[in-house]
Amino acid sequence: MTMQAEFDRRRLVLLIQLYLLLLVVEGALRKWFLPSLSDPLLLIRDPVAIVICVLGYRSKNLVFDGYMRWLALLLAGFVAIGALQLINGIGGSPLVIGYGLRTYLLHLPVAFVMARVLNREDLRGILMMVLWAALPMAILMAIQFNSSPRSWVNLGVAGHRGQIFAAPGRIRPAGTFSFVNGPIGFFGIALAALIAGSVERGLSWPLRIAGWVGISLAAAVSGSRSFLAAITGVMLVGVAGWARGRSSKLGKGLVVSAFTALVAVNVLGSFDTVREGAEVIQSRLDQWGNGGLGRRLKYDYDTVLWAIVDSPMLGVGLGAGTNAGAAIQGVKGFRWGEGEWPRVIFEAGPILGLFYLIWRVWITLAVGRAALRVSGSGVLLPLLLWGACASSLLSGQWGQTSIQGFGVFTLGLTLAAGRTAFRQRPAAPVAEPSPAWVRRQQAARRVSA
């Protein structure tokens, strides 16, 4: 690698770290420190994403191959459909369509730049940053859970009175993020890093204990079933990776991780705040046990079917189904369904919308399959990170900036971890020639002589 290439790579790594930092502090800026600038701060990472894409392309770290070729075709389709919507007066406002294009176009290429520029040391540095921040973030969430819903620490961003309620008198704490969906993405990365570090024995015991305490505390006070589902998904794919690799090293690491997590849960269980948080979570899980999950799945299926049947061919306008787009037009609430799939289908129309969703399903399955193959060599990190972002890739509400940000960022970490693992795999041993083959070669040389 030339000096210029390494210089460009280091600049991109710094920009990627800045992207993560802004992703973590964006909500704090919007709700606590600069509430009057809440709307512009919604786009605070966009300039960084643009610079990453431009510099990545100039330094040949954004290459249009594989996933990117299909994504480029889809993005061209979104530009065309956005132009047709403007010409035909669909969507109501160029600003709303512009925000919609930003949602579909801008941030996904960042993941593919990350895949090419992050090496093993860069990955470790980013994951250590997240792990060191896990316990302070969890303590902040516990304070928010234990505080009044109307207290300063539980302020919402402009246009929202506060955080979402989990139970009477208790909110779903958001930490430094705008809403609880931010901690879900954050602690998904933390858990993947913690399990992988425990398996590879690359973490100190104080950091392991602090990580498990932080993740367990955050889960207990989150008041969110989605939070529990996210960390459960990471754990399940870790078990799947061990089952494929059948490595004693992986097995010991997972056992140690499970034991440490169990100790952390039992210690935290002695605190009143944690016990109350567990009761709130249990009450919400009971709603699923009483048929609530079935009703929710049926609702999601019905809304997707409704969108396919009722959406206009040119859609209702890119960005019209997002909360930000609705606010620009002076409307509140989910106008085209709460889920991501009906929103995309209504905004872009049934043809382009479905092609885009198929691409998201395809990349989720393709990256997951590749990560599972890598786990067979004893490297769990790519599969664990995939478990942290698979749900967001499939059906995450990317009109919400934190969900999209963590989905894209964790995808980039997954691809980078897979590439570094592939590059560092030991070369396959060269098979020794059989004695019969050696005798035939010697006889052939004697005949030719």
Image (spheres, rainbow, N blue to C red):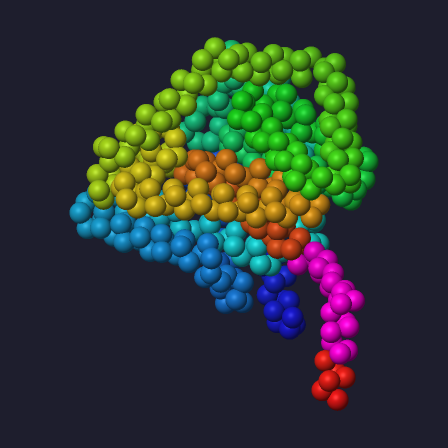
Picture layout, residue 61 above or below residue 374: below
Q: How far across and down, in percent of the image, does residue 361 sit?
A: 44, 42
- The answer to if 390 sits in the magenta stretch is no
Position of the N terminus, as image quadrant, is bottom right
| Residue 141 visible to an observer of this rendering | no
Q: Quadrant of residue 446?
A: bottom right
Between 377 and 85, the residue placed more toward the observer is 377
Q: How many dots with numbers?
A: 0
Picture layout, residue 287 above or below residue 403: above
Residue at point 48%, 22% (across, down): 164
Residue at point 73%, 64% (across, down): 430
Q: How far across and down, in percent of the image, does residue 347 sit?
A: 30, 40
Picture layout, residue 187 above or below residue 439: above
Residue at point 75%, 18% (across, down): 266
Residue at point 43%, 39% (across, down): 398
- The answer to if 431 sits in the magenta stretch is yes
Q: How far across and down, in percent of the image, does residue 20 sit?
A: 58, 46
Lateral position of residue 220 relative to residue 111, left or right: right
- Spot the residue most to the bottom: 449
Q: How far across and down, in percent of the image, does residue 373 sit?
A: 61, 47
- Spot the residue most to the left: 88
| Residue 35 visible to an observer of this rendering | yes
Q: Quadrant of residue 201?
A: top right
Position of the C terminus, as image quadrant, is bottom right
- Spot the residue most to the right: 205
Q: Specify the segment rendered in magenta.
A: 423-443
